[in-house]
Image (cartoon, coloured by chain):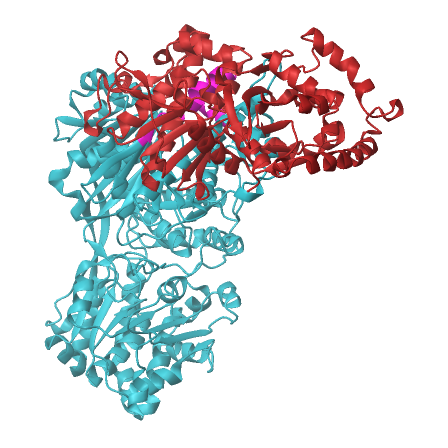
Amino acid sequence: MAECVRLDSSTSTHTMDKSITLPPDEIFRNLENAKRFAIDIGGSLTKLAYYSTVQHKVAKVRSFDHSAKEASSDKLYEISVQEEVTARLHFIKFENAYIETCLDFIRDHLVNTETKVIKATGGGAHKFKELIERKLGLKVDKEDEMTCLIKGCNFVLRNIPHEAFVYAKHADSEFRFQTTQPDIFPYLLVNIGSGVSIVKVESEDKFERIGGSSIGGGTFWGLGALLTKTKRFDELLQLASKGQHTSVDMLVKDIYGGSYGSLGLTGDLIASSFGKSATANKEFSQEDMAKSLLHMISNDIGQLACLYAKLHNLSRVYFGGFFIRGHPVTMHTITYSINFFTKGEVQALFLRHEGYLGAIGAFLKGAEEDNPNQYSWGENYAGSSGLMSVSPEMNPMQRARSGTFDMLEMDRLERKLVNLPLLQDPSSYIPDTVDLIEDALAREYWLYCFEDALDGVVKRAVASQPDMPEAAERAEKFRQKYRHKLQTLRQQPFAYGSLTVRSLLDTREHCLNEFNFPDPYSKIKQKENDMALKYYQKAVKSLDELSWEERQFALVRGVLAGNVFDWGAKAVSDVLESDPEFGFAQAKQQLEERPWLIDSFDRWFERLKGPPHRCALFFVDNSGVDIILGVMPFVRELLSRGTEVVLASNSGPALNDVTNGELQILTERIAAMDPVIQAGLSEDRLTLVQSGSSSPCLDLSRLDKVLANVVRERKTDLVIIEGMGRAIHTNYYAMLSCESLKMAVIKNSWLADRLGGKLFSVVFKYEVPDGQPSQDSAAS
Amino acid sequence: MAFNGHQRDDEGIDEDETPTKQPRSDKEKPSDEASASAGRAASDRRTSNSTARLRSDSVKKTRPPFPWFGMDIGGTLVKLVYFEPKDITAEEEQEEVENLKSIRRYLTSNIAYGKTGIRDVHLELPDLTLCGRTGNLHFIRFPTHDLPVFLQMVRNKHFSSLHTALCATGGGAYKFESDFRKMADLQLHKLDELDCLIRGVLYIDSVVSSGPSECYYFENPTDPDLCAQKPYTLENPYPLLLVNIGSGVSILAVYSENNYKRVTGTSLGGGTFLGLCCLLTGCSTFEEALEMASQGESTRVDKLVRDIYGGDYERFGLPGWAVASSFGNMMSREKRESVSKEDLARATLVTITNNIGSITRMCALNENIERVVFVGNFLRVNTLSMKLLAYAMDYWSKGQLKALFLQHEGYFGAVGALLELLHPS
């Protein structure tokens, strides 16, 4: 994986975009291929969902026919860019006032739709039914609101990591995202619209409205409009956030003079909401009354939610509905109330895509024949506008951005993603090492770093498509889009869930793909693979000449030195430009001498003296020297020891990481030169699988189902993770239920500094899970 | 409540009489600065006085001297119970100090005190035997914000010279403790309000035998035509859920007289009803607010299930008449302009009452208790709320829960405080 590097030429301008009103054609992306529609019309917002196919370019590698000997001097494989059609879900949120404009636009641009029906839900569905049918010529099919809501909720909880968060107003990071639980059920959904519905969800299809309350968002709005001169919901919340409820509410201390000690009721507790306003001749400020009202309603809902959670023994309680919808004030008061009533036993959870639940659910109802639940889906960071805080103080971007539209796009991943079966505790697994929402210092550095590296990425993207004159223009659009994302994240780190180095990298990949740069490194990878292959035999030969003991160390050093090779890392790219063999030797010299920053080599060495592992799962990193001269000899040794090897590589391209397609070809070529690899392949002891990911990082909770099956069938007892992206930015703290080896070279000074090392420091982390007898004792 | 409001002629005499009959010289006449020291002096004298009396009658040993009061100082109302002995012997009459007589006369010969003090005559318990004495128990209330007026009167009547302990409960017993000391030279004996409440409920229920039954319920609460108030015998009361609706609400699970816990509470109580009504309608008293509510129509203010779904929301078993969003119709400007103050008062009452019902029902389920007793002054002359509560309990629990009410609604804390005076626990 490549790190971002400082480029001196970088002069980033931090001017914020002025008020842009996004034209509908940028909102309704891929509309011409829309296959299916669903609409959720609420009191003030309309949410439209459509499913369409997206044609985009993908890089494919194809092996030349090497039986014809003359090809051997030529390139290793052929790279072609092909058009691929994938499925994408689009969700757009806009104010009801725009509905007619939007419907007109859809009608004018709809080309390929097969459907004759539009699924509709939400309170406003009947109001606009006639309009939709007339404008679009589609039949409106109404779906039950609650069913849609629950369906949508299940969908986002299952498919979007970090969908749910805890809100903590006074914490360093207001948004604390929750890790995705392997089992999302059972949970309580408290939907606060005009009234409140409390729904217990036990499985995909089993849910029950166990209760509710008439005191909800409508009460806040209705009573608020009567008590103040403010008639709009958002403005009432604004008023409330400025008020002091203590002048209107009767507190415990107003009755007791202090606290009510024997019951543990503190003096500041509200004893009677509006208790002080029971007098005819006093004026109360609008702000104070609005605040008191907000407290009264939030507390009441929180209390009821707790009572229901207790009665049904549920600890996961999600809150949604227009009363919540990203409003920090209401999230805070609800959170406070839940904490108070459950003494911290239940946490109030909120959802990033809460506003889309109904639309998603309605869409899923209509798409049941497409089996959307059979696939995994992933949020497309390039096409989604992300969570925006509604509070203007918190969100200076709000006005810069068009406040009128919000978007969410989800890609259908062609493969079902599951947990790695070897995770010690899937429910507590967090892939990312540093949460940049919490760690402001790290956030500042990485956001700066990614912005700084942008010029280089743009340059590389243009260079990767020399035959396309418009590449420069597309690359420029990519630059704008990604820079805008970075700026958004600077303002709202929580926009896409947890902000991590991984999410920054993934966002960049999504944006590159968006502008048809499917694999900017393809040619570099090709050249590098080609050159490295030439030295494979020589490298293996020199390793074979070493004693067993010397070889074990040399193999590890080889993997580490190979990992130094990284086109993204400025520090090494110069060396690479010249002579790779020389480079490899140099890289070994660059490596830190033992003892390494993290050094459990001695334990690993002892372990190797013991019985061979049954099967090793190896998550590989870069192409070229890394995979060919570093990883392959290591794999060869494992095979020779009698250990089966599963090589897991990316399904799609990401930076200079070797993809599964490339690795297939490389392995074949190596097999042709190396009988050990050859035997491994033919005896099915060496297997290549794809990880299901196209990220430079690794999320062990979202891996290809096939990989998981192979791991299980082969009784894998060793997991090897290589490289910064997979072993440091992610999985550094991952606990596995079998032995594991994490190897990486730190190629970023800032990070090295943070970990207490220096540039090219080595992390070699060999771990044996607690309770498992260390096998090296058996060997001695 | 203006206790010194000169309602009756004899009160004027009291005021004049007191200083002269008082065994105190004029120079000791309390003023703000001198009251503390004057009080001490007075109580020294009283001690010797009472010792003499106690010697004369052994039965009296366990009995505190008159007057017997119990007080509950809430957030909105002060509740006072007063035991008027009717078996005073001639000898006693002779011994009785003049200001004790004057207090008795003042309290029993009036039904209203000043502008805001009221004696609930209909609740009076006659011929009650307490600690071997027979008399009438009187129930008096006045707004907490008039407490200074009350204290002034207490001071003017030299209550402190009687040297009886004043047992008080409610938050005000704590908040105003120093006011009692400074303004009226009285040391309050502070008691926990929930202890008093439970003690009071159990006591009153046990002593009321004649007249209307203390405990009652509504038969056929779901049928407005057949709905009727029926007596209920709280013979074996435990476990019961006791819901005290004052300014705020406390919900207690009671397993025996001494074993209870506060399950939860809500700040949406009587104070919220009155407070919101004052803001929404410009009214100023509970009675006014209730009167308006009785004439209004909440369905013009609230959004009902049928307003959203056209009828029942069958999928979830929600009837069309159920309120989906309290004040939900008030989101629309036209509807805001078309509702009356009476409608708003009614909606406020219904909202608060239903919410209490809803929280109570959840507590009953969580605590596994089927009997719910509602008390507190929010229910005073508030049949509307009582019927709503009875209905809500019955309907949403499908007949599992029974809502019970007590005649002496808001006075149990004060009664409990009086009992503490007579039988310290």
* Residue B101 is at least partly visible in this image: yes
* Residue A43 is at least partly visible in this image: no
Q: Is residue B145 magenta?
A: no
User: Is residue A656 shown above or below B175?
Assistant: below
> Where does residue A359 sit, x and y in percent of width and height?
26, 32
Judging depth in this view, the residue of A308 and A28 nearest the camera is A308
Judging depth in this view, the residue of A653 and A298 nearest the camera is A298
Q: Which residues are magenta?
A: A212-237
**Left or right for B236, reference A143:** right
Please identify the quarter of the rendering in which residue B385 is found: top left
* Quadrant containing the C terminus of chain B in the rendered view: top right
> Where does residue A529 sit, x and y in percent of width and height?
27, 69
Chain with red colouring: B
Please identify the quarter of the rendering in which residue A289 is found: top right
Judging depth in this view, the residue of B22 and A465 nearest the camera is B22
User: Is residue A522 shown above or below A625?
Assistant: above
* Quadrant containing the N terminus of chain B in the rendered view: top right
**Left or right for A214, reference A56:** right
**Left or right for A440, reference A40:** right
> Where does residue A328 sit, x and y in percent of width and height?
47, 36
Q: Is residue A218 magenta?
A: yes
Q: How many numbered badges does the structure rendering display?
A: 0
> Where does residue B354 sit, x and y in percent of width and height?
37, 24
The residue sitting at 27% across, 17% down in the picture is B321
Q: Magenta: predominant secondary structure element?
A: helix
Judging depth in this view, the residue of A274 and B306 nearest the camera is A274
Drawing shade for chain A: cyan
Please identify the quarter of the rendering in which residue B101 is found: top right
